[in-house]
Amino acid sequence: MNVSLGTINELKTAIGFGLFSCILAFLWSPALTKFLYKFKLTRRAEYDATLNISTKTGTPIMGGLLVIVTVALVTMLFNWERKYTWVPIGVMLLAALLGGIDDVLHIYGHERRNRKLKQILTLIRVHANWKQRLWLIITLPWSTFKRLALTLGSHPGKGVHVHEKLLLQFAAGAITAYWIYFKLGANWQQINIPFDGYVNIGWWIVPLIIFFVMFTANAVNVADGMDGLAGGSLLLTFSTLTILSWLNGYQEITLLNATVVGALIAYTYYNIKPARFQMGDVGSLGLGALLAINTIVISKMLLLPFLGFIFYVELTTVIIQIIGRYILGRRIFKMAPLHHHFELHGWSEEKTVMRFWIIHAAVVLLGLWIALY
């Protein structure tokens, strides 16, 4: 491949963005740490969908702000381009806001009431007020959706409930889909089929975008359970995305990905065990959404299972565990997501994280190799 001087200069600029972002993140990290401790934004408990277990209590959460704020600031100041970076940053901030609210409510919120469907059906039959009965009937589909969504969540607790997260994540995916389908033109409705070229799938790209944004955001969120796991894995993924976006000529997306890499270097430095702080939902949801969007924009949507491999595996094990619990009546894993399964098998946290990093790196490398054909 012949690389022009201009292309090399673009790569140099991207590396410069990464270095600047890294330095900036390191510089303001002490202020973030002080803020998290001052307002006691520390983890109270952590729950699994099939086994309640408290871990990592006392560790500050919302450390993902180090990445989210740094990336947003650097992009808005030096890489603010309407066609390419407005929506990715906007959706990242929307998902991060949802995660931040969830983090804060888990600490300062109150337990929220959730009626069971059986209780609602009983009230429909026996409630003395006919207007209230009518309201319960009208809202029964919504109540059913809420109860079904709870099966996907680990512990409703005080935070944002699963049905609320799903709706807001759907909105984030819909914004992305609208932007790509209606604002960027027909060329952006193409997806790259590995080893086969590009295919224009028209409006079918809309539900695919919504699915991948929602799935990837939740996948990264689920993987944020061990010190260094999410940060190190994201570092590998966004580094690869930087290379892919550069090779495909998406300069603004290249700079955005490089900015994320720089900020993640600083975050992962502080997140290695024993972690100074954890990513929290504010970081995992925001960066998960951004990962999906930046991959979709460069027409590599079908590579997301490779680029986000360890995250997809983690979320898939949660889904399998839920199916096992509610349909088969037994656990498939000792605990979900998968990193806790190996932890209960006797693997140390460090061993689990390092092996997951290595496996993830190998599959991401495979994804890069496929993308080059």
Image (spheres, rainbow, N blue to C red):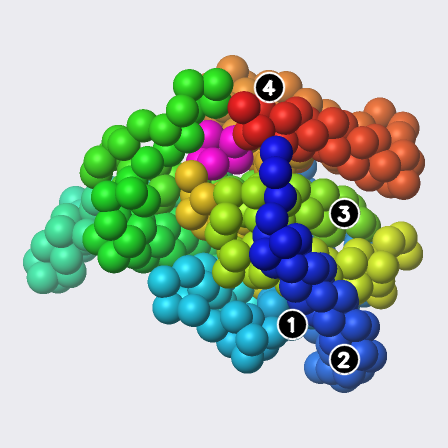
Camera-side residue: 48 or 260? 260
Q: Amino acid at mark 1?
A: Thr
Residue 208 lies, with reference to residue 232, above or below; the image says: above
- Determine crowd level at label 1: few under 14, some 14-19, many 20+ residues with C-alpha closer than 10 A: many
> Residue 186, percent across and down?
24, 43
- Determine crowd level at label 3: few under 14, some 14-19, many 20+ residues with C-alpha closer than 10 A: many
The residue at 32%/44% (across/down) is: 188
Please report the bounds of the magenta region as a residue range.
Answer: 300-304
Label 1 vs label 3: CA separation? 17 Å
Q: Which residue is mark 1?
A: 70
The residue at 46%/30% (across/down) is: 302
- The dot on residue 232 is 3
> Residue 135, percent across and down?
14, 57
Q: Under tag 1, what secondary structure?
A: helix
Residue 55 lies, with reference to residue 22, above or below; the image says: above
> Residue 168, percent across and down?
38, 57
Label 2 vs label 3: CA separation? 20 Å
Q: Which residue is mark 4?
A: 330
Foreground tag (4 vs 3): 3
Q: Earlier in the sequence, mark 4 or mark 3?
A: 3
Camera-side residue: 292 or 130? 292
Q: Which residue is mark 2?
A: 28
Q: Under tag 2, what secondary structure?
A: helix
Residues at marks 2 and 4 touching, judged by CB atoms closer than 8 Å: no
- Determine crowd level at label 2: few under 14, some 14-19, many 20+ residues with C-alpha closer than 10 A: few
In what quadrant of the picture does the C terminus appear? top right
